[in-house]
Image (cartoon, rainbow, N blue to C red):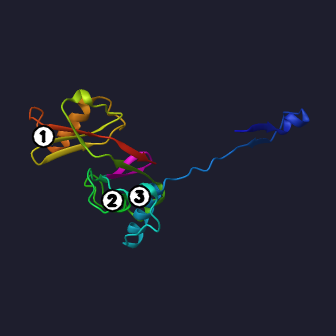
Amino acid sequence: LVKYQTSGDTTGDYTSVVGYAGIIIKRVEISPLVRLAKETVETYVKEGKTPKPEELTPEMKGKAGVFVSIHKFGGLRGCIGTFEPTQPNVAEETIANAISSATRDPRFPPIAPSELNDLSYSVDVLSAPEPIDSQDQLDPKKYGVIVESGFRRGLLLPDLEGVDTVDYQIETCRQKAGIAPDEPVKLYRFEVKRYK
C-alpha cells in the first residue's frame, strides 16, 4: 500500500466519504522448472499429450533426481519423484514426474481439468544422496533422508511442514518403506534446490 486517502481528507467533511488506495503489485517471476511442470500437467490433463521444452535453461540441462509437488488450496494434491536421475536431463525428469504427480500418486485420484486453475507447483532438484554413519549428521530443515533396508527404501524431502525432528523424519521414512522400527537400516542424506 503506497497511500490511502478519502475524499474527506480533501474537503474536510467526513460524513460521507469515498476512499482511494494506491497499491504497487509486484509481478512474481515463475521459475522455468515450475512453469515446465505446470504446462506439462495442464497439457497432459487437457489433451493427453506430453510437451517438450522449447529451450533448456541451465538448471534444466543437468542430470539429477527431481520431485514435483502439486498443491491445491495449500494442501498436498500430488507428489512423485526420483531420487536418482532416470531421464537424460532435469527437464525430462521434471516432465515425467509432473505427469506422475498429477495422475499416479496412489494417495489421490488423478487431477481433473476442472482443478487446474486451483493448483500450485514446486520442483525439488536433488543432490546425489550421500551415505551417513549417524542420524547426528541429519537436519530435517536442511537435508532430505533416505532410509534403506535391503530393497526397501523410504525417502522424505527436507523442510517439510510438520517434520521438525530427525527422529520423526526417520520414523516417517521407515513407515513409507515398510521397515520395522527395530530393523537395521542404512541412512543417506541429500540436499535440494527448491523452485516455487
Q: Position of residue 93 (x, y in %)?
A: 33, 59
Q: Residues within 10 Å of mark 2 (few under 14, many from 20)?
A: many
Of circles 3 and 1, the one toward us is 3
Q: Amino acid at mark 1?
A: Ile
Front residue of 13 and 165: 165
The residue identified by callout 2 is 93
Asked if one can make out residue 115 in the rendered structure from this viewpoint, the answer is: no
Q: Upstream in the sequence, badge 3 or badge 1?
A: 3
Q: Upstream in the sequence, badge 1 or badge 2?
A: 2
Residue 56, quarter of the rendered image: bottom left
Q: Are marks 1 and 2 in contact (CB under 8 Å)?
A: no
Q: Secondary structure at mark 1?
A: loop
How far is the residue under mark 2 from the one under mark 3?
A: 9 Å
Give the magenta-colored segment's residue range. 66-78
Vertical comparison of 54 with 147: above or below = below
Of circles 1 and 2, the one toward us is 2
Residue 159, quarter of the rendered image: top left
The residue identified by callout 1 is 179
The residue identified by callout 3 is 60
How far is the residue under mark 1 from the one under mark 2?
A: 28 Å
